[in-house]
Amino acid sequence: MKIAFIGLGNMGGGMAANLVKAEHAVNAFDLSDDALTAAKENGCETFTDAAEACAGVDAVVTMLPNGAIVKSVYEGSVIGKAPAGAVLLDCSTIDVATAKDVIAKAEGAGYDMVDAPVSGGIAAANGGTLTFMVGGTDKAFARAEEVLKAMGKAVIHAGDAGAGQTAKICNNMLLAITMIGTAEAMTMAKKLGLDPQKFYEISSQSSGYNWSLNAYTPLPGVGVESPADKEYQGGFATALMLKDLRLAMEAAGSVHATTVLGSTAAELYEKFAEDNGGLDFSAIIKTL
Ligand code: NAD
């Protein structure tokens, strides 16, 4: 298959390289020369214009920073520029409303398109082990699945257009809440004189079991190895968690959903990100 890939940053670079490994021909475009140089080294053909990269392809994949950029790239360089039969896949994390709007415009022009945001960070993008949550019609999903399988370990059809973004922001809002809850409980146990490792052993096998505790323990030297053991470097940056929480709050507001804990988590991460945006999101334990 011939695939245009737009947005070859921390995530997109590795994803495009995995499409090449799966024997797809990849036309790469990014505004950054460094990203294009790396893409060329990984076997992509590079372009200096997004619309040119989309000419003659079977599929277009985008991995871009936000909804405004996704909208401008699709409206300016993909819709009407990629061949009519191409399937379009936006893997960026963006707001649900923009995702639905761009897909409606693409469908109006005759394309099949999905929103397909990912779970998993840079290591999963490089290793081809991302999880994709996909929104779109059955036909668009079936066509997108072949492309996504080359970049991930799981590809799940979440529902109609925008359902992938909905799944992503609801999941990450839950993750923020469980991380803060886990951090609070571990800190309180320690202050009450309980050995944190004992707390981990007990709670990780009791009803306190959750991913933030069991698979991403936020205290150094306790539980499983995690970014806490590397001074909170690497992992999932606080700035990216904040981005997802802002999207979640925007979406909650649009449907009048009650998100008492989600709103509190968003407020805490807003404050923490002021000086700690580059640290892993589990570092929020340091504020408790
Ligand atoms: P990044 O900033 O490293 O990469 C984005 C790339 O897009 C950059 O190379 C940039 O030059 C390029 N770009 C920006 N505007 C462009 C345009 N108009 N045309 C072409 N290229 C353009 O970001 P990232 O970490 O790779 O994240 C990409 C997306 O993936 C985001 O939506 C993010 O929320 C999501 N995401 C990231 C992670 C992570 O751990 N980094 C995890 C899950 C999801």
Image (cartoon, rainbow, N blue to C red):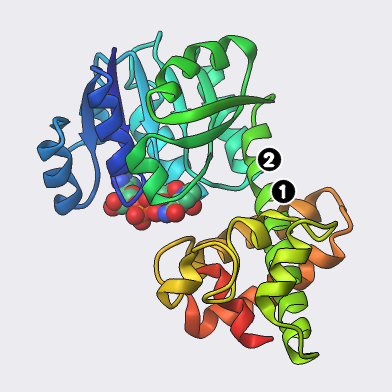
Find disc 1 in the rendering and name its residue: 170
In the image, taking residue 210 as reference, residue 123 lies left or right, namely: left
- Tag 2: Cα neighbours inside 10 Å, few (<14), some, or many (≥20)? some
Residue 20 position in % (x across, y down): 23, 25
Residue 173 or 129: which is nearer the viewer? 129
Task: Look at the numbered disc 2 and give the secondary structure of its residue.
Answer: helix
Residue at the image position 76 percent from the left and 84 percent from the top: 194
Q: Is residue 145 above or below residue 89?
A: above
Residue 135 or 130: which is nearer the viewer? 130
Residue 284 position in % (x across, y down): 61, 77
Q: Amino acid at mark 2?
A: Ala
Residue at the image position 39 percent from the left and 36 percent from the top: 62
Residue 25 position in % (x across, y down): 21, 19
- Tag 1: Cα neighbours inside 10 Å, few (<14), some, or many (≥20)? some
The reply to whether dot 1 and dot 2 touch (C-beta < 8 Å) is: yes
Q: Amino acid at mark 1?
A: Cys
Observer able to see residue 124: yes
Find disc 2 in the rendering and name its residue: 167
Residue at the image position 65 percent from the left and 57 percent from the top: 214
